[in-house]
Image (cartoon, helix red, strand yellow):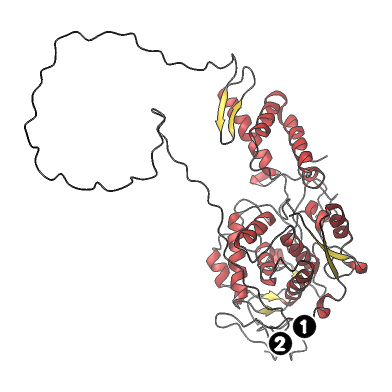
Amino acid sequence: MAKGKRRATGSGWRQVAPLIPLALFASAFTVSATDDPAIATASLENGLSGGNPVVVPKQPIAFPANVPVPGVVGHGVDPGEQPTQVVSGLSRNGIPNAALKAYSRAQQVLAQADPTCHLPWTLVAAIGRVESNHGRFGGNSLNSLGVAVPGIFGPRLDGSSGTARISDSDAGSFDGDGAFDRAVGPMQFIPGTWRAMGVDGDGDGVRNPQDIDDAAMSTGVYLCSGKTDLSKASDLNAAVLRYNHSQQYVDLVVSIAKAYAGGSWIAVGNGTAGDDVDEAGDQIDDPTIDAPSDKDLPEAIDIPTPTATATPTPILTDERDGNRPTDRPTATPTATPSSRPTATPTTVRPTTSKPTTAKPTVPTTTTPKPGLTSLTTAVGVIVGTAGSTLAELQKATTYCQSEMAKVTITKPTQTQLQKCVTAYQTGGAKAVDQVIRGLLSALGLLGILGGGILGS
């Protein structure tokens, strides 16, 4: 076994060390921030080459970096592998040295671009672990330039098998698909999102989502966008949830990041996992190893444990009398009756008079307009078109909610949902597309997100 190499043992390796000089990793970069979205977008389009700055937008990036895939928390996690198994196996799995450099560089550059963000390299690394196992998903490995070879591609986002339907946004230039988008690279960016905010993380003049340097730096910019402070639990949860709209994803990423911060990681050769791993720090004198040791990595920033917003638990209501019961009985009965009844009840014979007969009162109801049906939803009452049945109205409402969710409108207003339902019942799916385009245009997302999802 080569000098400096040994198999992983124990619970992990020490990695807390002083910051190395920024010039060693980021001498080609300048950093700044701006409140002007147009300037931010232009700077991000230019990337880092030629002295252009890393710009952290002061508004949070709303469109997701990646989208959830049914049954998969991330392509770097084996199907059926439990979160506890992923975390407990981190020291055996290892982080390729090219990826470690990229994660370290991201923390150091973002520490100057946005010092209030407190981005830890361990969080970027955790996302890399879940999204692609640090660039090794699908038989890939990182070459000497940090590029995933032969290339990492997620599933085709054509709406089948429960996936989101995102029409081609890059003419196939990043994902090789001219009809639909596929997430690309070690950090699994959707091409439309990458085109909008991907940066050149190593200053080579190319923004390549398959390059771990570019992808890791872009992940740092994404997480820090807006007034984000990742040392706060609420900001941390919100930032990672924007990256991938799955709370299960957030929980696993945070668990891995905390384990990495505690020392549960090892450096391995690019593309190597499991056997003949290199302890972080022991490879310094080994000329065949060019990975950052624990003395080269910036000090790990511990992150809080976010508390996800709980899903409200529905309270059953007795519709017969309209009274809402309390969540639970207020108290146990105070005492057992102290003694027997004091006296025998007096027997009272019923009177023989005939009861007064009265006509029953007919309950008053609000008569809906002829031919109209209504449906009560979480946002209010939705009314169908003339002549439609309740089943048809329910179908239209469900379809609209599904299509809106695909473009991240997960909580439409009553007006938005009503407009979409009416469009569906009068003009079908094409009319719904037009309504959603209008909503995205009003939200300023049509050119970035809507154009990719709905097509041209």
Against 324, residue 79 (above or below) is: below
Residue drawn at 57 percent across, 72 percent down = 89
Which badge, 2 or 1, is on the more N-terminal residue?
2
Q: Is residue 159 visible?
A: no
Q: Residue 290: which disc?
A: 1
Residue 378 in percent (x, y) is at: 56, 36
Residue that badge 2 annotates: 283
Q: Which residue occupies the foreground of this view, 416 or 72?
A: 416
Residue 272 in percent (x, y) is at: 69, 76
Secondary structure found at label 1: loop
97 lies left or right of 370: right
Against 329, residue 365 (above or below) is: above
Residue drawn at 70 percent across, 91 percent down = 3
Q: Residue furthest right?
A: 50
**Image quarter hosting the N terminus:** bottom right
Residue 180 in percent (x, y) is at: 78, 47
Against 307, residue 135 (above or below) is: below
Against 394, residue 261 (above or below) is: below
What is the spatial separation of the Cα atoms under label 2 and label 1, in whole angstroms? 8 Å
Q: Amino acid type of disc 1? A: Asp
Please rate how many residues cluster around mark 1, counting C-alpha atoms within 10 Å: few if below 14, some from 14 to 19, many from 20: some
Residue 167 in percent (x, y) is at: 78, 44
